[in-house]
Amino acid sequence: MTCFWDGVMKSLNKNDFDLINEKKSSHIELITMLKRRKIPMINVLWENQKLSKKEIKEHLLAIDEYDINCIPGGHLTSSCDSFLLLICELFKVNIEHMYMIHTIKYSNTKEVRKTLYYSSNDKHFVFSR
């Protein structure tokens, strides 16, 4: 089950990757790049709240420890997901993640190029628009 990474790949286009001088390729290369390019999410609000230094440190550690070999088993998307926080920071985007009937917002406070919309339930994650 690679639906999380399928959704992320579908939502990011060539211009997004050009912004950070990277090329769009496979799931594994995307995750490897995110792990390599991880930066503190200092410009991201989650649900209109700034992340504490401790929370940022924990999210960076979660990204660092993410096992690429587990991609086929699925990504356990968190309500405050480390990779969505990083994508928001790195690609200068806002994210609205509709989980069941709840919208979870990730907001870039520095620069916003576009908003990515995802939706999910307890089994599936997709890029909505």
Image: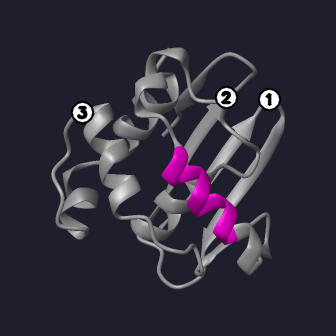
Separation of marks 2 and 3 at Cα, in angstroms: 22 Å
Closer-to-camera residue (107/58): 58
The answer to whether residue 113 is above or below residue 69 is below
Residue 16 is one of the magenta-drawn residues: no
x and y, in percent, of residue 109 in the image: 60, 81
The answer to whether residue 11 is above or below residue 84 is above
What type is the residue that disc 1 sits on? Met
Q: Quadrant of residue 31?
A: top left
x and y, in percent, of residue 7 in the image: 45, 32
Residue 57 is one of the magenta-drawn residues: yes
Question: Do the residues bearing badges 2 and 1 touch, measured as CB atoms within 8 Å?
Answer: yes
Inspect this view and state whether residue 116 appears: no
Name which of mark 2 and mark 1 comes first in the sequence. Answer: 1
Q: Quadrant of residue 54?
A: bottom right
Residue under the image location 46 percent in, 72 percent down? 39
Q: How many marks?
A: 3
Closer-to-camera residue (123/117): 123
Q: Which residue is mark 2?
A: 120
x and y, in percent, of residue 126 in the image: 53, 28
> Image check: 47 left or right of 111?
right
Q: Which residue is mark 3?
A: 26
Q: Secondary structure at mark 3?
A: loop
Q: Which residue is mark 1?
A: 100
Residue under the image location 77 percent in, 46 percent down? 103
Span shown in magenta: 56-65
Name which of mark 3 and mark 1 comes first in the sequence. Answer: 3
